[in-house]
Amino acid sequence: MQIVNSQISIEKTSHSRIKEQDINNSPFGKVFSDHMLVATYENDSWQEVKIIPYGNIPIRPSLSALHYGQAVFEGLKAYRSPMGRPLLFRPQANYKRINKSAFRLCMPSIPEEIFIDGLKELIKLDADWIPDQSNSVLYIRPIYFATDESVGLKPANSYKFIIISSPVGAYYSEPVKLIVTNKYVRACEGGTGAAKCAGNYAGSLLADKEAKQQGYDNVLWLDGKENKYIEECGTMNVAFVINDVVITPQLTGTILGGITRDSALTLFRDMGVKVEERLISIDEVAQAYEVGNLSEAFGMGTAATIAHISTINYQGKDMILPSIDQRKYASQVLQKLEDIKTGKVIESYGWVCQL
């Protein structure tokens, strides 16, 4: 066993599974790398941090996270530079966001030396799992949940923080078709919409299932108060190009502050593109479509990066957007993001962390 930074112990697997996998052609989230980081919080402090072989964790039916949902998570990716070095994209932003989510669910904050240092050591150890084929990356999933053996309703006293990783291909292979829902609401003011907690995603599954039954890929969510303002699409932030202006819903507390969203908006502004973060109603989008001013719509998220939206169904009518070869904004920013993430260009934002 190896001790790193006097904080993290490392136990390497005796049998790597990498030769048994085609990491350049893995289904999304089905194959996992050799190791995982596990940190334990109890007695008001973080007790141990270790990297161990990927495997099962023991739980009991009384585990408090199973009953009351104190569980948050993150998503980020590791890339391979042209020189073969592992690269992480904006891990500090994920570190800040998971603690923001944890605060909302009354969970202790995770120290930076556990999240950042532990993440770096884990990815260095499993660097061979980073695909080298275009459109394939190593997806990283930090998870944080309560572990009290109790069914009493209160903030837990003990927690586990775990990081696992998975080689993945493209999340969406084709442009996305969305349907606006007036039946379900993702989040309301004062709720957990701005936190990346597990329950938010569980609450979206029925709407997603019904969308797929109707021939669409996912849902375009509206606000929970007036049921008219656009919030998110599926698991992504969303943006529209109307009259050459990139318009995206402002972060009102009901929308997750996406790291890809922030990165894309920064790049758009630096490209000289006009960006508006504001309330935008579904009727405004529909009217822009009717008069021919809606040229693009796209999602922004870690899994998909930039996902072109081909169709938006609203009130039983499909809005069919221009083909991908007629779009310039989303495609340009997608290429810029990919060039930065993979180290093909030198960036000045401090976003890329080379291991």
Image: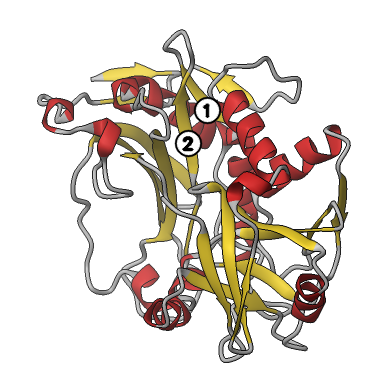
Residue 214 showing in the rendered view: yes
- Above or below for 66 versus 242: below
Residue 54 figure quarter = top left
Looking at the rendered structure, the kind of residue marked 2 is Lys
Looking at the rendered structure, the kind of residue marked 1 is Leu
Q: Residues within 10 Å of mark 1 (few under 14, many from 20)?
A: many
User: In the rendering, at what x and y percent does residue 32 appear?
Assistant: 26, 41
- Above or below for 204 versus 307: below
The residue pinned by badge 1 equals 88
Residue at position x 68%, y 36% in the image: 332
User: In the rendering, at what x and y percent does residue 168 appear?
Assistant: 34, 41
Q: Residues within 10 Å of mark 2 (few under 14, many from 20)?
A: many
Residue at position x 63%, y 89% in the image: 315
Where disc 1 sits, the SS reads strand
The residue pinned by badge 2 equals 77
Quadrant where the N terminus sits is top left
Residue at position x 34%, y 72% in the image: 66
Q: Residue 145 bears which disc, if any?
A: none
Q: Give the farthest residue toward the top.
A: 83
Residue 118 figure quarter = top left
- Above or below for 192 versus 36: below
Q: How many marks?
A: 2
**Horizontally, is 245 left or right of 267 in the view?**
right
User: In the rendering, at what x and y percent does residue 297 appear?
Assistant: 67, 59
User: In the rendering, at what x and y percent does residue 95 appear?
Assistant: 59, 41
Where disc 2 sits, the SS reads strand
Taking depth in this image into account, of 59 and 182 the one nearest to the observer is 182
Q: Are marks 2 and 1 in contact (CB under 8 Å)?
A: yes
**Horizontally, is 169 left or right of 74 in the view?**
left
Residue 174 figure quarter = bottom left
Residue 105 showing in the rendered view: no
